[in-house]
Amino acid sequence: MRNIIGSPVEGEDFFDRPKIVANLLRELRDNQANILLVAPRRVGKTSLILRICEEWKKDPHKKAVFLNIEGCGDELAFAEKLINELMETGFNPDLINRAKRIIENVRKMIGLKSIKYEGLNVDLGDASEDDLRTLGKVLESIFRKIEEGTDNVLIALDESPELLLTLKKSDEIAGPKRVVSFLHWLRDMRQTYRYKIRWVFLGSIGLDNFVSNHHIHYLINDFQLFSLDAFTPKEADDFLKKLCTSSNPLITLNKSKRTEIIRRVGWPLAYHLHLVFHELLNSKPLSVTAAFDSLLKPENLAYFDTWRERIDAQFSEPDAAACKEILIQACQDPDGCDRGQFLAVLMTKPSADVEIVDERLSSLLIILERDGYLIRKDSRYAFRSFLLRDYWKRIHDL
Ligand SMILES: Nc1ncnc2c1ncn2[C@@H]1O[C@H](COP(=O)(O)OP(=O)(O)O)[C@@H](O)[C@H]1O
Ligand SMILES: [Mg+2]
């Protein structure tokens, strides 16, 4: 198991979590569930789903496609990616090639401005067959074939809320409509072709957060939620032991050092343990304190920047500013703050309406808790990851 930092892991690099893998496979196989995998960023969602795809494909009658749709600029790019991945599985080449040709044509027609692009509803005009009238219908023709066949296909969509955000921002009026129409279409597909196709949605901005912010929760209420947590203390300890036995140069961490690391990260994510381990390899003599200190040096702060950047990407400007105020306040004390302290910080203008600010605070705290920034203990909210808390404090003090 290599000490890989940042990218999702596969194969030998994946530290097995057999119960979680078995539970998720059971939901998909036996209970025919479509899964919304919910977990804060960096908990290991992508790595887990890559493993699930591997396990799924061990059965010769099962195919799996994994799509990261973060970089897709529109529905057409999504369709292209889906079709390319299905092609890799060897599924019905005639049908896939036909869809590919249509999609290439649509691209050209958009370039020539000879059609009005309306997402999945783009009217392909003179297509002679009814099932090819729109882009959505072209994809549907593939799902229909899968449903009529003998193979089960797992489709995992990573970072789907990123695509939804792109669609939303594409146009002030048409953008939000495209989001609704895309989610509507996906739900129709899940419900119509439900025996042979299983779906897993995951992403760093929770789809559940996205839809509740936009009041369109009904479009994903058919999903079964599956939550993924950080390692248990036992898993974290085994993980560190495994990193030691496969490290080069070989290092030894005795039980008390491993316990100290787990205590000091506070929230044992594989990602954070990987980071600490990396710094440990560089510390001579081997010192846990030196490794933690090194992680918070200015040149290493980029490891945690994504947690700050995502706030700007995910929230409106005032909400992002309010979240940052909340986190700056919370990082001052390992035991965090109570609501009253946050409220006092947010009530900067004497004219602010306390009821409105209080309601906004409630919804932001729910999201910050759900996204893994904060954890609630009794009436206080504290940073969940001690590393992230120190990072927040450090960038605020800089
Ligand atoms: N089971 C695992 N075994 C080894 N490393 C893992 C595991 N899960 C996550 N990681 C590490 O954590 C980091 C984040 O994992 P990733 O799957 O990308 O998380 P997410 O998709 O939730 O953001 C990766 O760089 C990977 O190295
Ligand atoms: Mg991921």
Image (tube, rainbow, N blue to C red):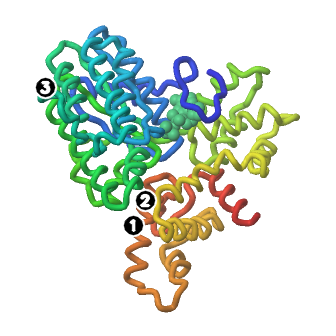
Q: As displayed, is residue 223 above or below residue 150?
A: below
Q: Residue at x 59, y 56 (%)?
A: 308
Three-letter amino acid code at disc 2? Ile
Q: Picture quarter containing residue 3? A: top right
Residue occupied by mark 2: 367
**Residue at disc 1, secondary structure:** helix
Of the two numbered discs 2 and 3 in the rendering, the one whose residue sits closer to the viewer: 3
Q: Quadrant of residue 19?
A: top left
Residue furthest toward the left? 130
- The answer, for residue 194, to whether it is visible in the render is no
> Which amino acid type is shown beneath numbered disc 3?
Glu
Going by the image, does 353 lie left or right of 128? right
Mark 2 crowd level (few <14, some 14–19, many ≥20, 10 Å Cα):
some
Q: Which residue is mark 1?
A: 363
Alpha carbon separation for disc pair 2 and 3: 46 Å
| Mark sitting earlier along the chain (3/1) | 3
**Residue 236 versus residue 193: which sits nearer the camera?**
193
User: Which badge, 2 or 3, is on the more N-terminal residue?
Assistant: 3
Q: Residue 129 bears which disc, if any?
A: 3
Asked whether disc 1 touches disc 2, contact meaning CB atoms under 8 Å apart, the reply is yes
